[in-house]
Image: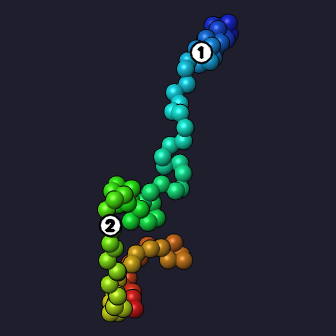
């Protein structure tokens, strides 16, 4: 019985060593942190059409939100689940 298990293990190792490994040449596009458009949305547009002029509209000035209530759920310090309203300013 041990001989059959040993022979099977050797066969699996031999097949695994002879099988070609599927690898792509070079790094993946997402493996680097400098691809166009990652942090600058205009870079993606420039990469798509380098001759075009890209204009970016300024972000509108946001008004502070009015105070309102939000429902929150969670565990108490005693491990009891509860929900309650919380005033968000």
Instruction: Compare residues 60 and 53 and report the one nearer the observer.
Output: 53
Q: Earlier in the sequence, mark 1 or mark 2?
A: 1
Q: Secondary structure at mark 2?
A: loop
Question: Picture quarter containing residue 3?
Answer: top right
Local crowd at mark 1 within 10 Å, few (<14), some, or many (≥20)? few
* Residue 5 visible to the viewer: no
Rounded to the nearest angstrom, the CA distance separating label 1 from label 2 is 54 Å
Q: Is residue 11 left or right of residue 61?
A: right
Q: In the image, residue 45 lies at what x, y percent?
A: 35, 60
Q: In the image, residue 56 lies at what x, y percent?
A: 34, 73
Question: Picture quarter containing residue 62?
Answer: bottom left
Q: In the image, residue 40 lies at what x, y percent?
A: 44, 66
Q: Secondary structure at mark 1?
A: helix
Residue 4 versus residue 68 in the image, above or below: above
Tag of residue 18: 1
Residue 23 versus residue 7 in the image, above or below: below
Residue lying at 59% horizontally and 15% vertically, measured from the top left = 18
Q: Is residue 1 left or right of residue 45?
A: right
Residue lying at 35% horizontally and 88% vertically, measured from the top left = 61
Callout 1–callout 2 Cβ contact below 8 Å: no
Q: In the image, residue 86 lies at what x, y percent?
A: 39, 86
Local crowd at mark 2 within 10 Å, few (<14), some, or many (≥20)? few
Question: Picture quarter containing residue 70?
Answer: bottom left
Q: Is residue 86 left or right of residue 16?
A: left
Work out which quarter of the rendered image holds the N terminus and state it: top right
Work out which quarter of the rendered image holds the C terminus and state it: bottom left
Residue lying at 33% horizontally and 68% vertically, measured from the top left = 54
Tag of residue 31: none
Tag of residue 53: 2
- Residue extending furthest toward the front: 51
């Amino acid at each position: 019985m041990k001989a059959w298990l040993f022979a099977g293990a050797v066969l699996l190792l031999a097949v695994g060593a002879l099988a070609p490994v599927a690898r792509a040449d070079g790094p993946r596009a997402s493996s680097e942190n400098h691809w166009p458009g990652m942090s600058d949305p205009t870079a993606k547009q420039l990469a798509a059409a380098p001759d075009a002029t890209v204009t970016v509209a300024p972000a509108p000035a946001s008004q502070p939100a009015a105070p309102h209530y939000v429902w929150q759920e969670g565990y108490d310090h005693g491990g009891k689940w509860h929900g309650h309203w919380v005033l968000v300013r």
